[in-house]
Amino acid sequence: KERIGADWDGVTVLEDNNDKSTVEMPYHIGRAIGTGDIKSVLRWINANQTEDRANAKSAEWMSMPALAVASLCGCLELMTLLLQLGANINTRDCKGCTAIRRLFTPSELTKEGVSDRVRLLLSWGAS
């Protein structure tokens, strides 16, 4: 206690409590997310319940999580479904960007429906 302080409660904030490994989404699922093919995406997610497929990352999209890909492609309904299935709202891609951060670029801000996507992400606690 002398070294770390008397007020330390024994729980560290830096601990990673996620015991699931990162799943890499197949190319065809990344394309399905990009085109809003909800049926194919849900079929793939539900095909293996032991993997955390709602948080899968795409190798083709700079390790972007499925939620970020859906967000950039304007798939509001798919974003909602991914969140309901347990997608982590603040997962980062290889550049350290979250889904909401990716929406705040000049090219994305001019797109139709961006405010709805931002509102959805904020309502789920995006930072």
Image (cartoon, helix red, strand yellow):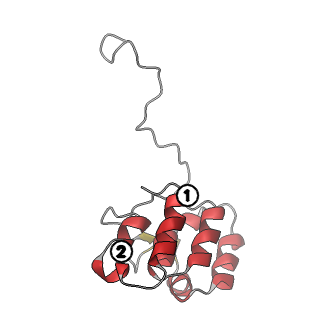
Q: Is residue 15 above or below residue 43?
A: above
Q: Is residue 75 visible?
A: yes
**Label 1: how many Cα within 10 Å (few below 14, some 14–19, many 20+):** some
**Residue matched to label 2:** 62
Name the element at disc 2: loop
Q: Nearer the viewer, residue 77 or 85?
A: 77
Amino acid identity at mark 2: Met
**Nearer the N terminus, badge 2 or badge 1?**
2
The image position of residue 97, as x and y in percent, is: 35, 64
Q: Is residue 85 above or below residue 62?
A: above
Q: Nearer the viewer, residue 100 or 110?
A: 110
| Left/right of residue 70 with respect to residue 52 in the rendered view | left
Amino acid identity at mark 1: Trp
**Residue matched to label 1:** 124
The image position of residue 61, as x and y in percent, is: 39, 78
Name the element at disc 1: loop
Q: Quadrant of the C terminus?
A: bottom left
